[in-house]
């Protein structure tokens, strides 16, 4: 069976549709009368799935507060300016390794089931996080992060489980709750890393052990690993197997005749899947680029086109960003999903990215105008206006980032069959991880070159990112076009 046939059959045949068409009035009345009642949300499974999903952002971000200090402690270079190179290498290897394994984990889960893949991945992540905290050389650090990324490739499988435990009647509630896990994890992780690194010197009366003096980064890694094991425990208790073929076989005692998963080439030949993968690449590139360039922009001197923020001010900005993301997911995402078409909303979110980059140089102009030349400090009105502007641009970026949740939903709705949901998620997550693996290096280099050579007044990076953002908007329109073709 070809992908086109699969797509067409999924579009044409619907067991809930009448075989003969009726008048528009009768049809409308029938739709109102037959509107399905919401399926009860599997709260235990959703809670376990969120606990499992929380593991990766915590493990990924807990090292951010101390990674530069860790690299310095390894005495890799005498030049402090080169520490950032090693830190970037450590951070990028995780994403690159995840890229190499993400599709394979999804493919395996379509055969052996979701639960085994999820549990193996989390156990592996817990072990490699401990390994990272015990590392005493660059080689040990890199191996630990590589292995951690390989085990974290099960993220597409976790997305598939969310699609399989929900349906169209309850996904408007489930997806926003699930979407809270990444911003929550990205707040918890740095707090753990910043609070519990070097515990023997910070809290000698509690953690003054020689072991923690010898391994000053073990404790945050250990705490992150314990959280991972708690996720495994909750998953073991509450998370049922959701792979359709396994679930049906367990209930009936015999194998089913459902269609098998499609190959990569066949999945990519389906227009809506290829559009979601390509747009997912652009979405991840823009989202990661904004996160990287925002920190660089805040850190850079005002005369170089930045804001000259301190580390604590940047920390407050990132905490604000996480709080805004959580508030959006919790307060308005459910309403949006119930009210608007997913493909159109995805397109709207992608259309916001150009403006998030365009606003940043405006903030620099505010800082320049409010800078007191005698003291070299910003006046109170300028500081207040800057924080309002920062809150606005962060809010804009987090609304644009709702496209991540919408991408999961659209993948679920447009997978050619139930058996291919895991591989469809894997393919799209692969595209996102590919962008995430090189976007930080590319955009930080572009930012540095723009400032060093004063290209377009140091704002060449703005012009490039706005152009890329508009390209992403153009690509995202293909999702809406192909979605209309399937439902029309």
Image (tube, grey):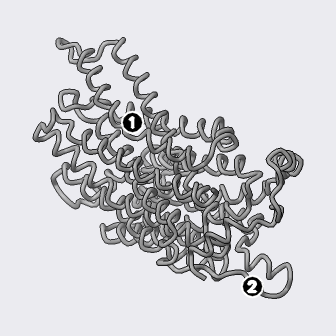
Of the pair 13 and 430, the residue shown nearer to us: 13
What residue appears at the point 48 percent right and 37 percent down from the top-left corner?
Answer: 321
Q: Which residue is mark 2?
A: 257
What residue appears at the point 51 percent right and 50 percent down from the top-left corner?
Answer: 189
Residue 206 appears anywhere in the view: no
Expressed as whole percent of the image width and height from the top left, the position of residue 137 reads 31, 68
Q: Which residue is mark 1?
A: 356
At label 2, counting other C-alpha atoms closer than 10 Å, the crowd grade (few under 14, some 14-19, many 20 or more) is few
- Separation of disc 1 and disc 2 at Cα? 49 Å
What residue appears at the point 35 percent right and 12 percent down from the top-left corner?
Answer: 380
SS assignment at label 1:
helix
Of the pair 373 and 423, the residue shown nearer to us: 423
Of callouts 1 and 2, which one flags the residue occurring earlier in the amino acid sequence? 2
Q: Residue furthest bottom?
A: 254
Q: Residue furthest front?
A: 23
Expressed as whole percent of the image width and height from the top left, the position of residue 117 reads 61, 75
Marker disc for residue 277: none
Q: Quadrant of the N terminus?
A: bottom right
For the residues bearing labels 1 and 2, Cβ distance under 8 angstroms: no
Of the pair 138 and 305, the residue shown nearer to us: 305
Occupied quadrant, residue 397: top left
Of the pair 360 and 409, the residue shown nearer to us: 409
At label 1, counting other C-alpha atoms closer than 10 Å, the crowd grade (few under 14, some 14-19, many 20 or more) is many
């Amino acid at each position: 069976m070809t992908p086109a046939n699969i797509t067409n059959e999924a579009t044409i045949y619907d067991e809930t549709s009448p075989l003969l068409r009726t008048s528009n009035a009768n049809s409308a009345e029938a739709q109102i009368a037959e509107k399905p009642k919401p399926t009860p949300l599997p709260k235990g499974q959703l809670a376990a799935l969120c606990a499992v999903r929380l593991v990766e952002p915590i493990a990924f971000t807990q090292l951010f507060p101390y990674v530069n200090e860790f690299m310095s402690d390894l005495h890799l270079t005498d030049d402090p300016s080169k520490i950032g190179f090693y830190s970037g290498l450590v951070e990028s290897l995780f994403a690159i390794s995840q890229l190499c394994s993400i599709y394979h984990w999804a493919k395996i889960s379509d055969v052996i089931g979701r639960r085994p893949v999820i549990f193996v991945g989390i156990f592996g992540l817990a072990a490699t996080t401990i390994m990272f905290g015990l590392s005493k050389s660059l080689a040990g650090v890199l191996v630990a992060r590589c292995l951690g990324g390989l085990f974290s490739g099960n993220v597409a499988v976790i997305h598939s489980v969310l699609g399989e435990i929900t349906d169209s009647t309850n996904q408007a509630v489930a997806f926003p709750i699930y979407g809270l896990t990444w911003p929550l994890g990205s707040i918890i992780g740095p707090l753990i890393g910043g609070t519990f690194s070097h515990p023997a010197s910070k809290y000698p009366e509690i953690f003054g052990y020689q072991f923690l003096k010898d391994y000053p980064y073990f404790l945050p890694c250990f705490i992150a690993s314990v959280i991972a094991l708690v996720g495994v425990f909750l998953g073991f208790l509450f998370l049922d197997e959701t792979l359709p073929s396994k679930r049906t076989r367990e209930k009936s005692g015999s194998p089913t005749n459902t269609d098998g998963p499609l190959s990569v080439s066949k999945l990519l030949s389906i227009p809506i899947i290829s559009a979601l993968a390509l747009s997912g690449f652009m979405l991840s590139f823009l989202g990661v680029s904004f996160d990287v360039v925002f920190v660089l922009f805040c850190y850079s001197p005002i005369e170089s086109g930045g804001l000259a923020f301190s580390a604590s001010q940047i920390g407050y900005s990132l905490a604000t960003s996480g709080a805004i993301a959580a508030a959006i997911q919790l307060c308005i995402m459910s309403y949006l999903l119930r009210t608007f078409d997913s493909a159109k909303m995805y397109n709207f979110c992608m259309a916001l990215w150009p403006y998030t980059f365009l606003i940043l140089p405006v903030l620099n102009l505010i800082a320049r105008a409010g800078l007191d030349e005698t003291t070299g400090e910003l006046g109170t009105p300028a500081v207040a206006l800057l924080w309002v502007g920062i809150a606005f641009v962060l809010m804009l970026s987090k609304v644009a980032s709702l496209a991540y949740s919408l991408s999961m939903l659209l993948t679920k709705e447009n997978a050619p069959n139930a058996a291919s949901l895991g591989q469809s998620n894997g393919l799209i997550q692969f595209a996102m991880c590919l962008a995430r693996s090189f976007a930080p290096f590319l955009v930080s280099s572009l930012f540095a070159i723009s400032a060093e050579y004063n290209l377009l007044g140091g704002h060449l990076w703005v012009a490039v990112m706005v152009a890329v953002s508009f390209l992403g908007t153009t690509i995202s329109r293909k999702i809406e076009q192909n979605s209309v073709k399937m439902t029309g």
